[in-house]
Amino acid sequence: IDIMSITSGNTMFDCDDLGPNSLTVSISDINGNTSSCTSIVTVSDFEAPVIFNVPGTSTTVYDCANIPDTLGYNVFATDNCDDMDITYTYNVQTTQSGTDTDCSFYNYSLTRIWEASDASGNMTTASEVILIEDNNTPDFATSIPDTIFALADLLNCSATVPLFITSTDYSDS
């Protein structure tokens, strides 16, 4: 068989061709006889977006009053197929208890989670973990007298000291 020519349609596929694509291949011989066949080439995107500029887990323990915000992080994601169709979500999870009398109300971790999804449904997440501790010492709101006098109970050899103190603490007033 003497083959004169082989022709085909598009043989290079990329993200612009996501989904099913028809590919026709034709062959002809020196006598002008031709034959063709058509197949379907399906282009799929299985690669998730990549998120940049998320700080990760902090090695610094922050005080309750100095939790860093997200300003200046410039978090963004890129995708192998289409940066314009990335969907972003952001949420926060915490181990902080709901009761301000619990120690874990003032000593807890805060996790910020960024999620990016592309048009093909591929998803990736990146998170930042921040450790928070109440390191503020309480301050006396009233002064304590240098000397306090109390009358002793002669039968019990004890005395009640009249002392009224108020204090403040930034975190847990």
Image: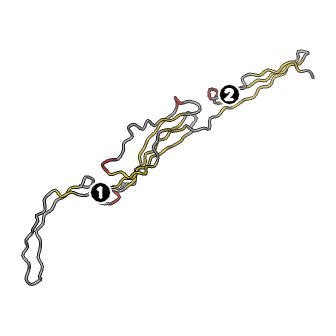
Relative image position of residue 106 (x, y in whole percent): 32, 56
Tell me the kind of residue under disc 2: Phe
Q: Quadrant of residue 162?
A: bottom left
Q: Quadrant of residue 79?
A: top right
Which labelled disc corresponds to residue 13? 2
Q: Is residue 128 above or below residue 25?
A: below
10 Å neighbourhood of mark 1: few (<14), some, or many (≥20)?
A: few
Point out the tag, 1 or 2, that comes first from the N-terminus: 2
Q: Residue at x 13, y 59 (%)?
A: 143
Query: Mark 1 = which residue?
Result: 100
Tell me the kind of residue under disc 1: Asp
Q: Quadrant of the N terminus?
A: top right
Relative image position of residue 18 (x, y in whole percent): 63, 30
Relative image position of residue 89 (x, y in whole percent): 46, 39
In this view, the residue in front, 33 or 61, is 61
On screen, residue 100 versus residue 76, left or right, reads: left
Report the residue that reaches farthest toward the front.
146
Q: Is residue 56 above or below residue 159?
A: above
Q: Residue at x 29, y 57 (%)?
A: 100
10 Å neighbourhood of mark 2: few (<14), some, or many (≥20)?
A: few
Q: Is residue 41 above or below residue 8?
A: below
